[in-house]
Amino acid sequence: MSTRPRTTDVATHITVRFEHLLADAHPNAPASPATGKARGVGASASGGESEGAKIAIVSLDRADKINGLTLPMLQELSRVARELARDRDLRGVILRGEGPSFCTGLDFASAFAKPSRIVTGFIPDIHGTNLFQRACWDWRRLPVPVIAVVQGHCYGGGLQLALGADFRITTPDAKWSILETKWGLIPDMSGMRTICDEVAPDAAKWLTMSGEELSGAEAEKIGLATWVAGAEGGTNSVDAALSEARRRLAELATRSPDQLAATKLLFRDVHASPRTTFRRERARQLVLLAKKNTAIIRKAAMKKTKADFARRGTWLR
C-alpha cells in the first residue's frame, strides 16, 4: 500500500492519490510509495515509467455516513474522472470506499436539503448526461481501465457507481442491492444502461423490480461483480480485493494504452446497430494501426521482449 499522504476535499469527501505499481513484482506485492507533495488530481509521483505503471486510487471518504453520496460528492466524482482523463501517463484507476462499506447510495437528507439543486441536477449537459448520471458514466468515458473494489454495503447509487467501472472486485460478504425500489424509484444514475451491460435482461428486471439483496459471491455468479477476492470476510478480504485490483491493472499495463482506450470506446457504444458498430470497429482499428504504441507492442511481441510504451494518444470521449 502506498504511504503517500491522502488529499481529501473536506466538502466533497473524495480522496485521490497516485501509486506506481512495481514492475515485474509478485501479484501481491505492494505498490511503490509515491513521493512529492499532493496537490489534487493533477499531482503525480516523481519518477518515470521505470517505477511501474501509474495508477490513481479514488476513494469515497465519508465513512461516518457509510459513504452516502451528497451532491458535492457527485460533482467531484465527475470532475475527478474528467481531469484524470487528461492524464496521458495514467494507466488505471481503482475506485473504492473508505471504512467498512463501499457506498450506500444517495444521502437523501443531504440531497433534499435544497430541493432546487435536485432540479438543477436533472438538467443534461451537451453529452446528454445530468449530474447524477455523469458521476457514474464518466468512469466509462475515462480512457483507462477502472476497477471498483466493493466491500460492505453497495446500495442504490453506490451500485450504479460500481457499475460505472469496467470491472468490479467484491468481497464475498458484501451486500449488493438496487435499493431505489424501496423508495418507489428506478436506477437513474446511468444504471439502466450499465446493469444491462453486465447481467441478463431478465435478471436486470428482477433486481430492479424487487430490490433483492445479493451477497458479493451471488453478485459474481450472475455477472454483477467480475471477481470475488478473499474468503475470510472483513479487513482481510478488503486487502485481498485491493491486491487483486492492483494485480489486474499491472497485467493490463503490459498492453498498449491506446488499444485499451479504443476497446473502452467500442464497448461503450456496443448497443448501437450492427452497421454502426462495424463502422466504429473499422474506424478505431485504422486509428490504432497508425498509433506509435501499436508499433511498439508489435515489435516487442516479435522480439519477445517487454514493450516500453509511449504516452497514451488522445482519444475523443
Image: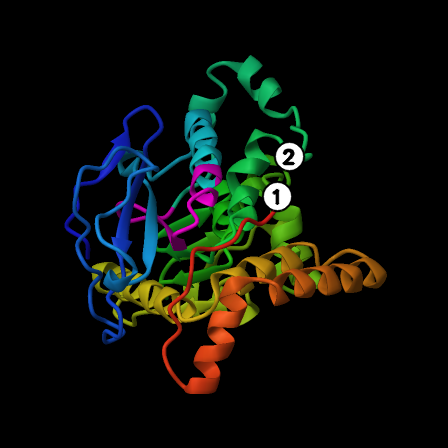
Q: Nearer the viewer, residue 302 or 175?
A: 302
Marks 1 and 2, how far apart in space?
A: 8 Å
Question: Residue 10, labelled with which disc?
Answer: none
Location of mark 1 (residue): 190
Q: Quadrant of residue 80?
A: top left
x 56%, y 37%: residue:
134
Question: Which disc is residue 129 wearing?
Answer: 2
Task: Judge the density around disc 1: few (<14), some (14-19), many (≥20) Cα neighbours within 10 Å.
Answer: many
Which is more toward the observer, 78 or 230?
78
The number of discs equals 2
User: Compared with residue 184, is residue 53 higher up or lower down, i.e. above or below?
Assistant: below
Q: Quadrant of residue 305?
A: bottom left
Residues at discs 1 and 2 in contact (Cβ within 8 Å): yes
Callout 1 amino acid: Ser
Of labels 1 and 2, earlier in sequence is 2
**Label 2: element kind:** loop
292 vs 101, left or right, is right
Tell whether 208 sits left or right of 77: right
Which amino acid type corresponds to the residue marked 2 in the rendered image?
Answer: Thr
Measured along the vertical axis of the image, is residue 269 above or below residue 134?
below
Residue 307: x %, y % from top left: 40, 73
Residue drawn at 34 percent across, 37 percent down: 42
Tell me what residue is drawn at x 61 percent, y 55 percent. 195
Task: Give the magenta range.
Answer: 82-102
> Is 88 a magenta residue?
yes
Reply yes or no: does residue 300 show up in magenta.
no
Kindly state the secondary structure of the residue where label 1 is placed.
loop
Q: Nearer the viewer, residue 231 or 275?
A: 275
Q: Position of residue 163 (x, y in %)?
A: 53, 52
Q: Which residue is at 49% across, 53% downward? A: 165
- Say whether residue 199 is left or right of residue 84: right
